[in-house]
Image (tube, helix red, strand yellow):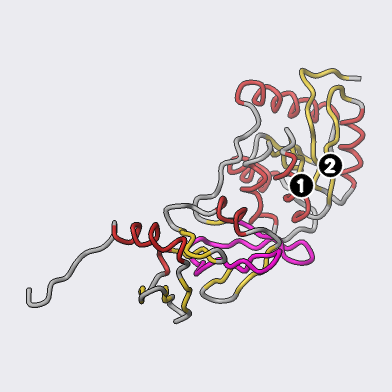
């Protein structure tokens, strides 16, 4: 049994023979341990974002056509090691995304090499910081599909019992989250609470008429009494007065 430097959690994204091989290698190598395994890239991405394993092994030949869209999320939460039998493709993706890569068929010697290298990086720099995307976020739809939503596309967010409704210029999404929780996730310079049930995208305001905010789709959102003064103070900071006759 090979002994490495420190306790290291490992996640495996694969639904092929590489998963069995990696599990066997990890189990025989102290102090590595398996934090999780999935052949479903969407489910794996959600788990990795939550548990933030030290190392993620990804079999890029797995049947996951949308995986490129999710690599940034995984790389912000774990050190990524690709596994492939296509050398040029693996090398190009390694340069863009990863700590290292392994060529199939897997060997234990190569496994020890890439894990040791990853542990050295982790010991010097720590696990990658989960830096938030400043322009967008992801939500989970039915059947595990992840949908990217741009902040700029949001008109408003509305409380709907135990859910929130994210209203876009085209379409809407219902998410199991409280409005207060969602408010914490939105950039404060772009979004403002205007009612106990509404958060509005400032950049999407078409006009303000008395106690109503008019949006580009001509939908009106009422400004609540509690929120009216701070909202109008915010708008006053951006107000340019026009005098007639000048």
Q: Are marks 2 and 1 in contact (CB under 8 Å)?
A: yes
In the image, is residue 164 part of the stretch drawn in magenta? yes
Q: CA distance from mark 2 to mark 1?
A: 8 Å
Q: What is the quadrant of residue 124 in the picture?
A: top right
Rendered view: 90 above or below 225: above
Q: What is the quadrant of residue 69 in the picture?
A: bottom right
Query: Magenta segment, principal secondary structure?
Result: strand
Horizontal side, residue 172 vs residue 118: left or right: left
- Which residue is depicted at the point 86% across and 43% down? 18
- Which residue is depicted at the point 87% across and 24% down? 29
Rendered view: 212 above or below 188: below
Horizontal side, residue 145 vs residue 241: left or right: right
Q: Which numbered marker is on residue 36?
A: 2
Residue topped by disc 1: 47
Q: Which residues are magenta?
A: 137-165
In the image, is residue 129 part of the stretch drawn in magenta? no
Counting from the top left corner in percent of width and height, residue 122 is at: 66, 26
Counting from the top left corner in percent of width and height, residue 126 is at: 64, 27
**Residues packed near mark 1 inside 10 Å, few (<14), some (14 to 19) or many (20 plus):** some
């Amino acid at each position: 049994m090979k002994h490495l430097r420190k306790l290291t959690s490992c996640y495996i994204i694969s639904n092929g023979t590489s998963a069995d091989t990696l599990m066997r290698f990890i189990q025989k190598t102290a102090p590595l341990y398996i934090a999780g395994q999935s052949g479903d890239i969407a489910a794996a991405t959600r788990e990795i974002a939550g548990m933030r394993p030290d190392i993620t092994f990804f079999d890029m030949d797995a049947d996951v056509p949308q995986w490129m869209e999710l690599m940034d999320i995984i790389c912000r939460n774990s050190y990524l090691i690709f596994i492939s039998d296509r050398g040029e493709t693996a090398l190009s993706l390694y340069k863009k995304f990863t700590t290292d890569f392994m060529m199939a068929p897997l060997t234990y010697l190569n496994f020890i090499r890439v894990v040791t290298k990853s542990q050295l990086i982790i010991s010097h720099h720590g696990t990658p910081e989960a830096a938030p995307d400043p322009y967008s976020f992801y939500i989970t739809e039915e059947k595990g599909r992840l949908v990217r939503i741009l902040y700029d596309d949001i008109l408003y967010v509305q409380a709907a019992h135990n859910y929130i409704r994210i209203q876009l210029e085209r379409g809407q999404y219902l998410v199991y989250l409280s409005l207060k929780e969602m408010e914490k996730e939105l950039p404060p310079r772009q979004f403002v609470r205007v009612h106990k049930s509404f958060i509005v995208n400032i950049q999407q305001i078409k006009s303000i008429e008395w106690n109503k905010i008019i949006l580009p789709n001509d939908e009106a959102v009422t400004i609540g009494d509690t929120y009216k003064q701070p909202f109008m103070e915010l708008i006053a900071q951006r107000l340019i007065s026009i005098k007639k006759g000048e």
